[in-house]
Amino acid sequence: MMSITSDNNDDDDAASGRQMLEELVITDSSGQEPSTYSPSQLESLPAELRDLILSHIPDLPTLRALVRASPTMHAQYRRNRDALLRACLARELDGCFVDAYACLKSRVASFGECRTDEAIETFLERYRSWPRGQDTVSSLDSLDASSCRWLAAFHVSVVWPLCKRFAIWALENLAQAASGVTFTDNANHPAADVNLATKDAELVQAQKEPVLSKSELRRIFCALYQYETFCHLFGENEGFRRWAALSDIEIHEMFFGVFDPWQVEGIACIDIFIRQKYTTILDEIQRDLCDDNSKYRVRGFNPNGSLLIKEWYKGYLDMTTSRGLKLAARILYVTDHDTLVATMSYSLTRWFVNDCPLPWLLAIGMQAERRSDAELMAKLTARDEAEMRRDSMNFAGDDGPPGGPPLAWVLLWDGFYANIYGDYTPASTKSWGYVMWDERRWDELGAKDLIQKQWEEIEPNVIDMIERHYGWCPPIQWYDCEETA
């Protein structure tokens, strides 16, 4: 059974936890200056106080590090594990519990090995109906202990590491754009790692991790859980698709219809991040696995586990990406080249037998066809109608209730509601993870003006389509907007 202590970073976590024990500050009831306790003093506290300390740990990585640093604290944790996990999860998943719960229930162990069209449609209808403002504590109390432990293990071993890696990648891209740094080709871009097994791992260790606000963490957490749910339902995983007859448009409507457009854009940001990392990996290992490598004896017969990566590059990229975040979290932290080659050799998957990859669903043609069909069949969604009415869209701040549009999304669409995303929006903005960041971060980087400016880089015919079909055009100097209703 999985638990919060299942991971491979024991030494690092223990060292981090020992440091926290040494620096832990406890304020006495009189409100006087706090006293600092050594590890031995902390461990000698009554069990009730140790339990109180553990119940107020702010996040799961900190809780894991602390219980690994001290046998006494670990024993205390084991005695009341389920209650401590629920308390910590309630803080971690505040504002994104529904998406974490959907991820939990869509995995094979809960959903079942056979994913039929009917089962997927029923599940997504339920997902759409779950209230996003519900109390996280009471929701977690309704889960059995096994589900809480799975959520905790997945969150601390998959979601947190990828959240940190994504934030470093995206904010580095944004900082470079804000500073005016340009690159003549992709190979010169720092994000395009030449050797992932060394350079990318060193980057993560050497570069200071950005300090993320609660709202920024919430947006990234939600996007990661939503992305993983898509992979559970439509990707290549332990289960199998049976009687798959859903059209691409039906999948688009059922899945993306669950979310607001800026949330879909967040999913797209995660997909671009994962794909860029896998692209770097494939470029690094394809020579090792190619059938004309000297270690393979007979060319042209795919001998001894060799792979035709060059010939089937896109298929490998699409299918391997669709396997989800657990594989990505494991592979992106491999630092040895030979280990990376060995791991990828049995992880790569090539064929899409049933459902299309996520980028296809975010293509302009797919969205335009969905909207056209909706208009013909009088099945426009409330979001479509808000866009057609040209409803205003306001930024309500980062500290308010979760769910509202982030500042960058409002600025991109000049304050008008928009229900298009993916390939309709500038690709550069998604490499910044732009819908994840608070107003404070844009101010610190002096990058607010960059957002609308990205429309200048998009193909004019795309802007023509947006104006013609959706009644909106960007406020950029070179584009002559026609009068729209």
Image (tube, grey):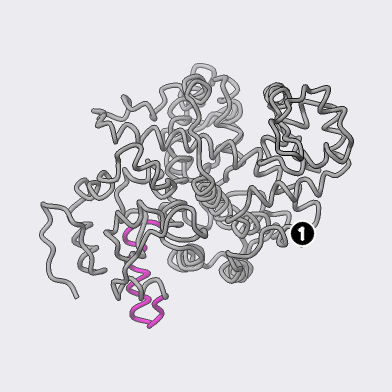
Disc 1 packing (10 Å; few <14; some 14–19; many ≥20): some
Secondary structure state at the residue bearing disc 1: helix
Q: Quadrant of residue 372?
A: bottom left
Q: State which region is magenta.
A: 362-381
* Residue that appears at 30% across and 54% down: 411
Q: Residue at x 59, y 71 (%)?
A: 129
Q: Amino acid at mark 1?
A: Asp
Name the residue nearer the viewer: 301 or 26. 26
Does residue 262 appear to the left or right of 91 in the view shown? left
Q: Image quadrant for the N terminus? A: top right
Question: Up-down: is 445 above or below 261?
Answer: above
Residue toward you, 395 or 335: 395
Q: Which residue is denoted by mark 1 in the rendering?
A: 141
Q: Residue at x 69, y 31 (%)?
A: 33
Residue 120 belongs to magenta span: no
| Residue 158 against residue 369 in the figure, above or below | above
Say whether residue 375 is magenta. Answer: yes
- Residue 138 locus on image (x, y percent): 72, 62
- Residue 83 percent location from the top left of the image: 81, 49
Residue 137 x, y percent position in the rendering: 71, 58
Numbered circles on residues, count:
1
